[in-house]
Image: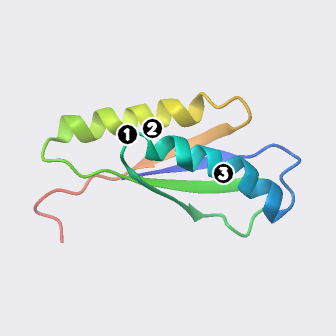
Amino acid sequence: MCVFDVLLPPDSRSLKAKRSYVRPVVAALRKLEVSVAEVGATDLHGRTEIGVAVVSGEATQVRDVIDACERMVAARPELQLLSARRRWYGEDDE
């Protein structure tokens, strides 16, 4: 899984404006066949956290999909990707 910490444009000071930036990103990420949602910073104006989860039998497949997601978020000209925090879960994790 990965959580993207994203800085939104200055005009995203209302919930409606914030969602107008977040929804297209979430929709674009879903095209990569991942589970995605706004998972944090929901009470902060101008900021959001978008979580992405991928399940696969191959770690390389998960890494490739997460890399593609990160590139997609970073390529959005209206957003600034501040960080991408990754966490790997394996068969030994509970």
Quarter location, residue 44? bottom right
N-term-proximal mark, 1 vs 3: 3
Q: Position of residue 9 (x, y in %)?
A: 81, 43
Give the left or right position of residue 63, taking residue 36 as reference: left
Q: Look at the numbered discs 1 and 3 and tell me whether their residues touch, using CB distance below 8 Å.
A: no
- To which residue does mark 1 refer? 66
Q: CA distance from mark 2 to mark 1?
A: 5 Å
- To which residue does mark 3 refer? 22
Q: Position of residue 70 (x, y in %)?
A: 48, 36
Q: CA distance from mark 3 to mark 2?
A: 14 Å
Pick whichever, 22 or 42, lies toward us.
Answer: 22
Q: CA distance from mark 1 to mark 3?
A: 18 Å
Q: Residues within 10 Å of mark 3 (few under 14, many from 20)?
A: some
Q: Amino acid at mark 2?
A: Cys
Q: Secondary structure at mark 3?
A: helix
Pick whichever, 2 or 56, lies toward us.
Answer: 56
Q: Secondary structure at mark 2?
A: helix
- To which residue does mark 2 refer? 69
Q: Residues within 10 Å of mark 2 (few under 14, many from 20)?
A: many
Residue at the (10%, 63%) spot, across then down: 92
Q: Look at the numbered discs 2 and 1 and tell me whether their residues touch, using CB distance below 8 Å.
A: yes
Pick whichever, 63 or 87, lies toward us.
Answer: 63
N-term-proximal mark, 3 vs 2: 3
